[in-house]
Amino acid sequence: MNKTQAAQLLASVSYVGTWDRKKGRRLVGFFAVMYFAGLRPSEAVGLRKADCFLPEEGWGVLTLHDTHPVSGKQWTDSGERHDKRGLKSREAKEDRPVPIPPPLVAMLRAHLKEFGTAKDGRLFTNERGGLVGSSTYWRVWQDAREYALSPDLQASILGGRPYDLRHTCITTWLNAGVPVAEVARRVGNSPEVIHRVYEGCLYGQEEAMNKKIENELSWPQVELR
């Protein structure tokens, strides 16, 4: 998705559910950390206030320590649906710092001001203060797509999954010229995976890419006999 579509989708998330229950509003920041920082949903679920450096101005940092994939109660030691594991492609206790741009810093500061944190410091919770379940954020995302996208785009694969926000983030960084190795470091992938998976461009940028090629070719004006 392009940045206009992403902005419309994030705004539409806030309209999901009633004002009192805040079903969508409490998840705007959740989706935003995928789009602006390339987090996986399982990483965003467990993000804590202590993991966030959110200055009043400029760039901030999210320092990721663990991930919370959905495994099912029967497969976890705690009996909860979410397991707690180390970061993907990292040693067990290795952290991953991710710089975050000012728009995301502002969104997370606003989120903390309105919603605070769970008892254990987590930023994002369900209505009861527990971990956000995958079924919950999937339903919110599907409702937001209906608000934000035209019928033809709703029927397409554009932004079809919350994880596509992470895909969009990575593609945006690559199109901006960020080196593959740095993109890989920030999102917790290997450079090989980045090369193999993220070769597409953003929605609607084919014309811009064609223009770049045309400018590079710029055939000289010569008289043919």
Image (spheres, rainbow, N blue to C red):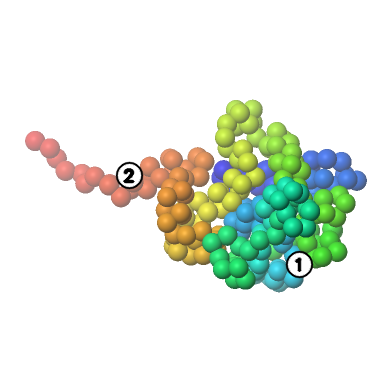
| Residue farthest left in this picture | 225
Q: Residue at x 74, y 42 (%)?
A: 135
Q: Quick one: SS at disc 1? A: helix
Three-letter code, disc 1: Lys
Q: Quadrant of the N terminus?
A: top right
Q: Residue at x 78, y 53 (%)?
A: 80
- Which one is closest to the eye, mark 1 or mark 2? 1
Q: Quick one: SS at disc 2? A: helix
| Residue farthest right in this picture | 20
Determine if residue 144 is in view. Answer: no
Closer to the camera, 68 or 19? 68
Q: In the rendered view, does 69 fall on the left or right side of 188?
A: right
Q: Position of residue 104 (x, y in %)?
A: 67, 60
Three-letter code, disc 2: Glu
The CA distance from mark 1 to mark 2 is 48 Å
Q: In the rendered view, does 31 fall on the left or right side of 152?
A: right
How many C-alpha atoms fall within 10 Å of the one at disc 1: few (<14), some, or many (≥20)?
A: many
Q: Residue at x 42, y 50 (%)?
A: 196
Disc 1 + disc 2, Cβ < 8 Å: no
Number of labelled discs? 2
Q: Position of residue 225 (x, y in %)?
A: 8, 35
Q: Position of residue 125 (x, y in %)?
A: 80, 54
Task: Say which residue label 2 marks.
Answer: 214
Task: Say which residue label 1 marks.
Answer: 49
Determine if residue 167 is in view. Answer: yes
Q: Residue at x 74, y 58 (%)?
A: 77
